[in-house]
Image (spheres, coloured by chain):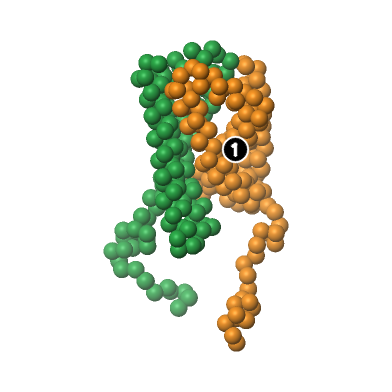
Chain colours: A orange, B green
């Protein structure tokens, strides 16, 4: 058999669309995506700190951007990503102890991760907008 | 043979437990350690941001440069940089296999993480000591 045929007839590992979606799968993927987003999001944190250190004029300009509609939407997404990734980290720390890995428990942890991140983000923004 | 795998490692290697990368569980451990630190530090940071919202700019700059807040921010930025470098390293190792692309991206990952850390540390120190 030519090597090309051999390669073509090899079984492929199932790709994403083959799997039935499970809560653990959703939070696993979300954990990685939010992690990568936060990685580049640190540029915003560094930018803000540099702006603060650059003097009142530039700091006012950057804070103005942050409190614009687009800025607030970005920050809302940033805060959700941070909270989701943080709760995902707690989920992993729980799993590291060997607890919560059974079928109901692992799904409950995953769902708590999703609901918790959305709830905490909304709560945070309600508090933030109230004190603004 | 399936029931008793032949030992492929010498007794010394087994005792050291460092594996083929000679790092053992160091990557895993650092990721968890900095993750835990990030959790604590980021909670404080989010509380700080909420506390700063709506304050006059002069007060915000004074608070950011105050010793406790500056130290907290320094610890957070350093812990984040270590954590995100490890995290992105795993993402690159999972998806990038090119002979050139992989090492180049791994190097850029380290450069990026250190750059973000250095920029942020510089800004925080300037806020604390700059006397702007």
State the image coordinates of residue A63 (x, y, percent, origin top left).
56, 22
Question: Which quadrant of the figure contains the N terminus of chain B?
Answer: bottom left
Question: Which quadrant of the figure contains the C terminus of chain B?
Answer: top left
Q: Please tell me which residue is depicted at 37% across the width and 19% down the height of the picture.
A: B130
Whether residue A126 is visible, yes or no, is: yes
Label 1 sits on a secondary structure element that is: helix
Is B125 displayed left or right of A78 in the figure?
left
State the image coordinates of residue A120 (x, y, percent, origin top left).
63, 30
State the image coordinates of residue A52 (x, y, percent, origin top left).
47, 22
Point out the residue furthest to the bottom here: A1
Q: Please tell me which residue is depicted at 54% across the width and 57% down the height of the picture.
A: B95
Return the residue nearer the eye: A127 or B36.
A127
Point out the residue furthest to the left here: B12
Is B64 displayed left or right of A110 in the figure?
left
Q: How many marks on residues?
A: 1
State the image coordinates of residue B72 (x, y, percent, origin top left).
42, 26
Whether residue A76 is visible, yes or no, is: no
Instruction: Reply above or below: B21 against A119.
Output: below
Q: Residues within 10 Å of mark 1 (few under 14, many from 20)?
A: many
Snapshot quadrant of residue B77: top left
**What residue did someone put label 1 on?**
A81
Instruction: Reply above or below: B99 against A63.
Output: below
Q: Chain of mark 1?
A: A
Instruction: Reply above or below: A44 against B83.
Output: above
Return the residue nearer the eye: A91 or B120.
B120
Q: Please tell me which residue is depicted at 51% across the width and 18% down the height of the picture.
A: A57
């Amino acid at each position: 058999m030519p090597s090309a045929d051999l390669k073509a007839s090899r079984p492929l590992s199932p790709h994403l669309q083959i799997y039935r979606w499970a809560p653990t799968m959703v939070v696993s993927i979300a954990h990685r995506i939010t992690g990568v987003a936060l990685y580049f999001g640190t540029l915003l944190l560094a930018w803000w700190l540099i702006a603060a250190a650059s003097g009142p004029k530039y700091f006012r300009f950057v804070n103005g951007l942050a409190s614009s509609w687009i800025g607030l939407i970005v920050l809302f997404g940033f805060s959700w990503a941070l909270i989701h990734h943080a709760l995902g980290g707690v989920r992993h720390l729980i799993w590291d102890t060997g607890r919560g890995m059974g079928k109901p428990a692992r799904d409950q942890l995953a769902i708590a991760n999703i609901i918790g991140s959305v709830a905490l983000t909304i709560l945070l923004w309600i508090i933030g907008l109230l004190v603004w | 043979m399936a029931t008793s795998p032949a030992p492929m490692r010498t007794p010394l290697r087994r005792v050291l437990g460092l594996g083929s990368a000679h790092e053992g569980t160091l990557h895993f451990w650092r990721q968890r350690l900095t993750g835990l630190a990030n959790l604590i530090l980021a909670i404080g940071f989010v509380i700080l941001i909420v506390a700063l919202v709506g304050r006059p700019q002069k007060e915000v700059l004074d608070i950011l440069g105050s010793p406790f807040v500056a130290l907290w921010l320094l610890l957070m930025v350093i812990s984040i940089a270590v954590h995100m470098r490890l995290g992105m390293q795993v993402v690159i190792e999972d998806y990038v296999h090119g002979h050139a692309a992989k090492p180049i991206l791994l190097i850029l990952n380290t450069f990026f993480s250190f750059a973000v850390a250095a920029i942020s540390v510089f800004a925080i120190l300037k806020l604390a000591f700059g006397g702007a």
